[in-house]
Amino acid sequence: MLQMITNPATLAALGEVPESGGDAVERAVAAARGAAGSWQRTPVLRRAALLTEIAGRIRAQTEGLAGLSTRESGLARCESQDCVRAAAACFDFFAADAAGRPECGTDVGDAPAVAAVLIPFDLPLPVMAEGVARALAAGLGVVCKPPVQNPLTCLALARTFDGLPEGAVSVVTGGAAVGRALVVHPGVGAVVFTGSCASGIEIGAAARGKRLDLEVGTVDAQIVCRDADLDLTVPAVAWTRLVCGGQGRMSGGHLYVERSLAREFVDRLHHCVGFLDVDDPDKPATDLGPLISLDAARRLEDQVGRTLRAGAKLVLGGRRFRPSGLPGHFFQPTLLTDVGAGSVPMRERLLGPVITVTPVSDLAEALRIWTEFGPRLSPSVASIYTADAEAAGLAVQAMADGAFRINDPSVGDLGPFSGLRHGGIRHALGADRKHIEIANAIERKPWWFPYVDRARAP
């Protein structure tokens, strides 16, 4: 059976992929196991050289891969280009890591010979690249399952793996049944998964005895203190929450704003978000494209409705619409304030261009509410904006776990998506459960909105 893949902005057909069955999974795992022996015997420096070659091929195909990503995933053009660059950087990173430690390869150590890499619909290129490059650097065979919504870009990325032993990386397309078949397959010894908490729990239960590397999406927080520089904090918050249409790994979750400046903050945010360009993402100046699917749009509309019924106030947006007459899955940039403790945005990730704000008395109250509600399968991320970074650092030292970024939005100085893993903390054997990064003051980044500035850049 074939599945049609369509452009989420125009609904035009892009291609078809098969719904793989058990036979396809068996063949892919067998191929990866067959290739793993010779691949493991390949000298580590040779593996590193092949990974570097793959990085070069990815960069050489930047425009083609980015164009397909934009048409298939609805990412703004510059964001798709960022994804391709990040994918290439993953291969370079693990090549350098292996080459620097030729006696032991990477930290995967004695993990089993085949890893299954399950890829989410948001940012599939860098997530696939990280999972594949890390496993290959360690000498493992790999079987990938792309997202059901947008698999074509992953299939195109897989074509850059020419030069590897035949079967070293296999790709099987399909839905949840294919993922489950991979997770429980006795020939798969390691599972790499990026996605929702609910799916992560299911995988953890089904993959008993296997090595797990789970990155699950929890409800992150952005906390704005009364002394924050709003000239910089407002655009930082807007971009962090709405990058990739608000559907990305690192999208900044729910906002807590100290009550003394909440009204001014919301007014400024309204002005900032209200002028973002929502359109066909293939246009260079588009800031926000469509949601990935009709189901995603309906889910987001339901979440917004439940939040409003719980007492929140609608400042901007709130529903689906058709910019430029496009028939795709577009959702208005939306701003909700006065969101009550324990309501939907604190418990569920809102995957779309929706910013939700809860006024609080101070940083301590924000941290208390944030830790009280929401799924806690793994630590999540709190970004704090303040002029007193030292005091904020002392406040988060008392927290039990989590990742804390003070005056440092979720993507750091290396550029968009370089901090991909901060979108959800890695929950793996031996992983640290607390991480703190502090900058004395926030700095404007060249990749923030509006994207027309990036389109005009040389």
Image (tube, helix red, strand yellow):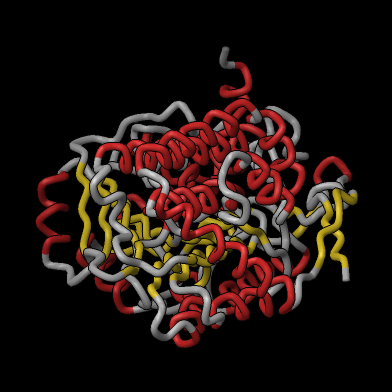
Question: Residue 283, how many percent across, how many down?
Answer: 75, 31
Task: Determine which quarter of the picture holds residue 107.
Answer: bottom left
Q: Residue at the location (42% across, 47% down)?
A: 42
In the shown orientation, is residue 238 left or right of residue 372?
Answer: right
In the shown orientation, is residue 8 left or right of residue 436?
Answer: right
Question: Residue 119, how many percent across, how many down?
Answer: 57, 61
Task: Determine which quarter of the picture holds residue 6.
Answer: bottom right
Question: Residue 415, how many percent across, how many down?
Answer: 42, 33
Asked whether the viewer can see residue 217, the reply is no
Q: Which of the pair 334/15 is nearer the observer?
A: 15
Is residue 384 placed above or below 448 in the rendered structure? below
Is residue 132 placed above or below 268 in the rendered structure? below
Asked whether the viewer can see residue 55, the reply is yes
Question: Residue 353, how many percent across, how many down?
Answer: 60, 54
- Quadrant placement of the C terminus: top right
Q: Residue at the location (69% across, 66% down)?
A: 296
- Quadrant placement of the N terminus: bottom right
Q: Residue at the location (46% across, 82% down)?
A: 207
In the shown orientation, is residue 395 left or right of residue 184?
Answer: left
Is residue 385 placed above or below 441 in the rendered structure? below
Q: Which of the pair 113/434 is nearer the observer?
A: 113
Q: Which of the pair 296/38 is nearer the observer?
A: 38
